[in-house]
Image: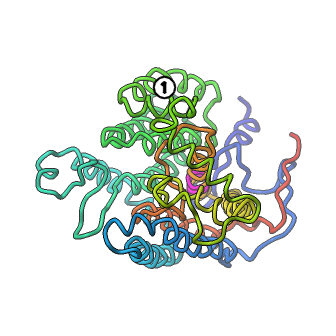
Amino acid sequence: MSAKAGEEKQKIDPDNRRAVPDNRRAVPDNRLAVLERYNKSELDYVLLSIIVIFYGIGIVMVFSASINEGLKVHDYVYFLKRQVMWAALSLSACLLFIFIDYSVLEKIKKILVWGIIILLLLLLFPPLLRLGIIHPSRRWFRIFSMGFQPSEFAKIVLIIYMASILSRKSGRLNDFYRGFLPPFLVISVISFLVFLEPDFSTAFILFFISILMFFISGIRFASIISLFMVSIPALFLMVSGKGYRKERIMGFINPWSDPTDKGYQIIQSFKAFAFGGLAGAGLGRSVQKMKYLPIPHTDFIFAIIAEEMGFLGVLGVLFLYLMFAYRGFCIAYSQKDGFEFLLAFGITSLIVWEAIFNIAVVTGLLPSTGISLPFLSYGGSSLLANSILAGILINLSRQRADTSYQTGKIIWEKR
């Protein structure tokens, strides 16, 4: 390989000599046209506003969707109070991570990885289950009256680890033993421990986002295909290992074959969309949340949004996620450093794909997975983890390279 070709293959950040993935450019070239510049020290206030709007919608819709569930514990505002508490804590965490030095997270990545592995192992420790410290589902710890779900924070740890290790190994990723294998083993261990909780959906999303980060870092496409081919038997065994997973798949294939059991939840979700129409039944007027759609304030909250706010409300929520994706990927492609680029890309991809998977389940395009709708579903650990990630992403918007992104759109041209 010539010196010129080698230079084109991998760009190096002159400040810290870290490799920048070759499929992402640190400066505009013939592929990337930047239409307008931002001040690189300015926060992305649009993205911050989107997060705050998500908090507001989430609180309102959790309250509306959970009233019937709250009455079961003799307090119709039970879930509202907890969601407001978690939202306040999450907003504080988001603001904190906007202004702290995120490079510290890279320096302590090994501590974070070992810490999350230990927490995930503790969830499998029977004595803690008998003492009541671990919830019977084995997915979270009980801390006073609150729950702490380590698998949600495993997402943060894995993205930080992958961004760091892939940016440093950018030129060696296609070397199986020195480049590819070490991070892949970490991914596999964490994903497998999450799967053992059991939490198949979170294990899948961890593995999926990690593979995306591998791909964007420059690993050969053939290697990705080979990895997926090897993973198919393992995926089949995981899905077929539990009876309820088979039932979810059967309910997805033909929910009307068993409308009172396997297909019940998705059919009730369809009805919620049908009842909503164009403008919705009105806030708080959902019929499906009243003993028809099971636990509507968690994974199926999007169906309640559709019923109460209609097609227009659905479009509004989709627009917010689309804007989040746009701003997030713009922040990623404005970074001059490989770690920062991969960190922003991983955060944006995680939140966007979680939203895609959740909405696909609620609309019957995928079997039920248990993946919550980011920022909107009830759940403290999920909201807190996503808020920390959002804070880091907004922080990265302050660190744009001189070729900062624009408010319009980024145009990708032909090679």
| Left or right of residue 189, residue 394 in this image | right
- Residue located 59% across and 69% down the image: 285
Relative image position of residue 270 (x, y in whole percent): 62, 47
- Residue located 63% across and 70% down the image: 399
249 drawn magenta = no
- Residue located 50% across and 53% down the image: 293
Quadrant, the C terminus: top right
Q: Is residue 335 visible?
A: no
Mark 1 Cα shell of 10 Å, populated few (<14), some (14-19), many (≥20): few
**Which of the 4 image quarters holds residue 385?**
bottom left
- Residue located 12% across and 51% down the image: 130
Q: Report the front residue among 319 and 151.
A: 319
**Residue type at numbered disc 1:** Ser
Q: Which residues are magenta?
A: 345-351
Q: Secondary structure at mark 1?
A: helix
Q: How is the image coloured?
A: rainbow
| Left or right of residue 116, residue 354 in this image | right
Q: Is residue 411 visible?
A: yes
The kind of secondary structure the magenta stretch mainly shows is helix
Identify the residue under disc 1. 231
Quadrant, the N terminus: top right
| Left or right of residue 179, residue 381 in this image | left
346 drawn magenta = yes
Q: Report the front residue among 358 and 207.
A: 358
Is 113 above or below relative to 320? above
Relative image position of residue 302 (x, y in whole percent): 59, 57
